[in-house]
Image: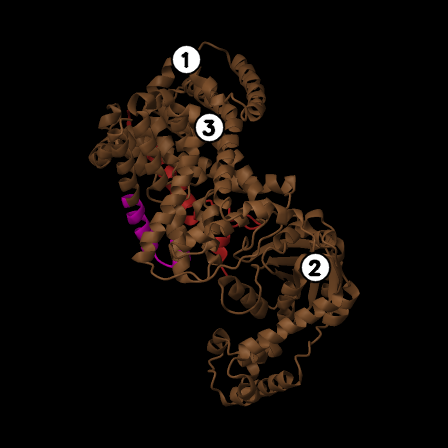
Amino acid sequence: MGISDIILGLLILSGAFYILYRSIWRRRGHCGLCDSRCRCIAKFKN
Amino acid sequence: MKNITVAVAGNPNSGKSTLINAIAGTNLQVGNWPGVTVEKKTALLKLENIQVNLVDLPGTYSLSPYTQEEVIARDFLVKEKPDLIIDVIDSTNLERNLYLTVQLLELDIPVVIALNIYDEAQKKGIIIDIAKLEELLGVKVIPTVATKREGIKDLLDAVKTVAVEPEKFKVKKLNYGEDIEEAIKIVEEELKIKKADLLSQYPSRWLSLKLLEGDKLVLKELNLNEDESFLKKAKHHFIEAHGDDMESLLADLRYGIANGATRDVILKDDNKRIDITEKIDRIVLNRYLGIPIFLLAMWLVFKIAFDFSKPFSDYLDSLISGPLTKWTAYALNSFGSAEWLISLVTDGVIAGVGAVLVFIPVIAVMMFIITLLEGSGYMARVAFVMDRLMHTIGLHGKSFIPMLLGFGCNVPSIYATRILETERDRKLTALLVPLMSCGARLPVYAIFIGAFFAENAPTVLWSLYLLGIVMAIVLGFILKKTLYTGFAPVFIMELPPYRMPMFRDLLVHTWQKLKHFVIKAGTYIFAVSIIMWFLLNTPYGVEKENSALGKLGKTISPVFEPLGFGTWEASSSLVAGLIAKEVVVTTMAQIYVTEEAEQKEEEKGFFEDLRDSFLSFILAIKDAFGNLISGFGIKSLALEEEEEKTPLKSKLQGIFDPLSAYTFLVFVLLYWPCVVVGIAMKQEFGSWKLYGQALLIHSILAWLVAFVIYQGGRLLGF
């Protein structure tokens, strides 16, 4: 395994963590609570 | 372009969301029980050159400040001042619905009444004199049947008229009697002098009535108290005549108007005959039969779900672990990709995400049947039937509604606790919701049941769901005696009539429930698969047992030793399940499957594989329908599948025995709720405390119950 493999591996891993952060924390997961514009209503309370 | 806001208000289960869906072509969640909409939702609609913002308000019986739905609806109407209110009325229950209408008319906002469910009223022999109702209330009344889109055009014409000629919709002031009108006048005049700025913000008549009622939220917002001299002066006469309770007095008055109007406009009420709803309810709500019927219905749901979906799951499994993996590896090899990258894609992503996707058919069929039961009105009966049991844990049947929603996904159930009146009820229900087995746990059940209990698949699955409900009652009872003491008020719930949901609605709402599982598979199950692969292959080239994940699993595995699954593989999969329950299967697939998959290479060409896949799919459809028909005879599909075991199932059979497998499933059912449930709890209750409690309580509960089952089973010789 060369240095390029390690860099590629780290990039893929960072991407995975970003997707996880984005889908779980920023978008509060997916729970079927969407309004007509597919926004999570939990994020748009009053 | 002109912009107008139209609020859609009405009693729970009067069909507001269905009406909006019919008007705007949206797909708002609907269900045949009260309280489906717990938050206002919006839909946009273009009418020629008018942009209409339709706002679906939560269903309320009044505009008092006692429940969250009422506060949300009231705040929107009073503070946002929509251009029009469409008041959706259940025509079969005119009097009760008109009580809200009377209050809406106090807001000085144009109102149009949609006399919804008009067809059912007619079937029941209720004839409403629409012209008279219009005359009495001074509003336009349009009969509608939202499910059939009847009356929608007239409703849209009314919306257009409000936008173009608002003066045509002048609000008629209902006369509350000389004394009350005099009192309102006193308060209004005083407000004009002392709080003139408020009268531009709030409807003056409504504000005066709320001050007379002593509405605490309004008093607080205006920085006034009940003892203000002008209020005392206005109420003086009533306090002497009726005591201090102005709120009840005004409520009686509004009920009087609603009652009088109903008597005046209903021409014939031939509602004496027993309709089909009552006939069914006599059996379904029977004191002794209600719960057994519910249990039987649950068993049938699982039986149908398993029988129908299994051929599709098997098909997907063979497709993913066969041609998809093979040809992806081939393509990556052709590009000269590194060995580790090929392993990451095939053993990590395809095996991990694939392990969840395989069970999408089971989840889809389950969600379809649950949607059917919701839409038919049966789920509302379940809440009613469960009321007595729920009282033993200090809650009432209404709490069972969010819990039932939990069979789909626990996250919306946490939000649905808003329909409950008190903070204590909401928190206690939220703590019990994760014990309801959500769809995400199905892949775990399905793989283990397929491997160990194929002959009794529906019964084993049923037992797990039932155990979840029983444990919720047990835990609720313990919490009632310790952390959440108190008692539940009497449960009053309106039971909707049975209705056959429209097939389109069924498909749409099944998809709404299902889509988040698909999105999850493409987002965080995908991400977790990659992370798990790295953990399983760090340092690269070592045995999985000695990888980072292996070491983590080994460290905690002693905890699970007394439960019969003290292996590093099971332990690390359970920990990974904190992200989402499906990840348990994802991780297991990555751990167990790799080397097995390589042994099954077959020398087939791409197009041969493509043709085989297509033929297998046709066969799966045939099998699914065949199973559905034969499932209620003697033959059961699961028995016939012995010959083709997937690599993961075979591997599991070598590691678990039926007792430890069942114990593992019980642990997965009861152990900690996933992080998304935690985020929902944090959002709803303002802190992580409740999720912390849930993590601790559920972990202890899961361990104890699994311990009793495993050790008890061993003692009994299983």
Please name the residue that numbered disc 2 is placed on. B114
Callout 2 touching callout 3 (CB < 8 Å): no
Tag 2: Cα neighbours inside 10 Å, few (<14), some, or many (≥20)? many
Q: Which residue is depicted at the point 58% across and 70% down?
A: B78
x, y (%) of residue B463? 41, 36
Q: Is residue B240 visible?
A: yes
Which mark is drawn over residue B601? 1
Residue B212 in the magenta stretch? The answer is no
Which mark is drawn over residue B201? none
Q: Give the residue type that dot 2 points to.
A: Ala
Please name the residue that numbered disc 3 is placed on. B358
Q: Which secondary structure type mostly characterizes the magenta part of the structure?
A: helix
Q: Is residue B259 left or right of residue B214?
A: right
Q: Is residue B357 above or below residue B603?
A: below
Q: Give the residue type that dot 3 points to.
A: Val
Q: Are marks 1 and 2 on the same chain?
A: yes
Total marks in image: 3
Residue B695 in the magenta stretch? The answer is yes
Q: CA distance from mark 1 to mark 2?
A: 64 Å
The magenta segment? B681-700
Q: Is residue B567 visible?
A: no
